[in-house]
Image (spheres, helix red, strand yellow):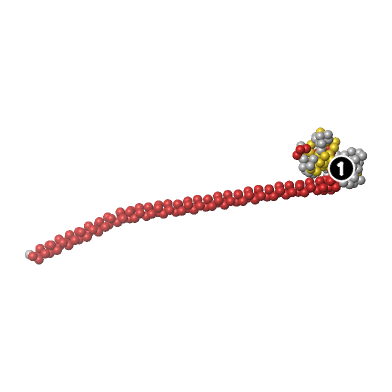
Amino acid sequence: MKMTKSLLILTAAVSLFGATVTTASAATIQALPHQEAAQAAHDAVENVESNDKSNKVASTSTTHSDQTADTHSTAASSTTSGTTNSHAKTVANDGETANSSRATAVVNLAKKLASMNIPYVWGGESLQGMDCSGLTDYVYAHVADIHLGHYTVTQESKVTKKPVSQAKPGDLLFWGADGGTHHVAIYIGNHQFVAAPQPGQNVDIETISSAFMPDFAGSVK
């Protein structure tokens, strides 16, 4: 009887234990799908965070690249502008130097002719004799290989006109109305000019005065 009770108790225990194991296995099996979903959700979150980090890095890299490109572009533009301006200034300075040298040579030759007792000769353009436009054409032809023409009106077209008060050494002085001038000379500075005045006189240096005032001046182009 006792053995029978023991067997019954053992059977009941085995049954209970089996049921517990079975129940535990079932619980484990029931839990697995939730674990997979949780793991999938966790992986998805990690992927999103990873993508966000990648996007931030890419965005930062792009911004830095753009800023670097802008900096290089600005620097290049500044350098180009600076080089262009420097070149323009150099060309302008060279032009001014050349004009200054030419003016000095014109004045020097004009003064030399005024010391050589060259007589006024109408239509002349040589050391044997010259008239006013012959003098100016002779000087510029020999100094700068510029041919002004042997006529005052023609010479008007070869200059940039200006008031007499703005005349500089080497400029031409004209007497008469614009387009109808009748006399020309070479301004040498200090209110003086070199001219072939009129028949009976030699090429000489004269002073500007109200009695014989030029109407305008001009810089030879």
Image quadrant in which you'd find residue 5: bottom left
User: Horizontally, is 149 left or right of 72 in the view?
Assistant: right
**Which residue type does callout 1 highlight?**
Asp
User: Horizontally, is 121 left or right of 8 in the view?
Assistant: right
User: Horizontally, is 42 left or right of 57 in the view?
Assistant: left
Task: Tell me if residue 122 comes above or below residue 18 in the rendering.
Answer: above
What x and y, as percent, mark residue 182? 85, 36
What x and y, as percent, mark residue 143? 82, 48
219 or 107, which lies in front? 107
- Say which residue appears at 79% left-offset and 38% top-offset: 217
Numbered label tally? 1
User: Horizontally, is 181 left or right of 13 in the view?
Assistant: right
- Say which residue appears at 84% left-offset and 47% top-offset: 109
What x and y, as percent, mark residue 130? 89, 43
- Say which residue appears at 38% left-offset and 54% top-offset: 46
What x and y, as percent, mark residue 117? 90, 45
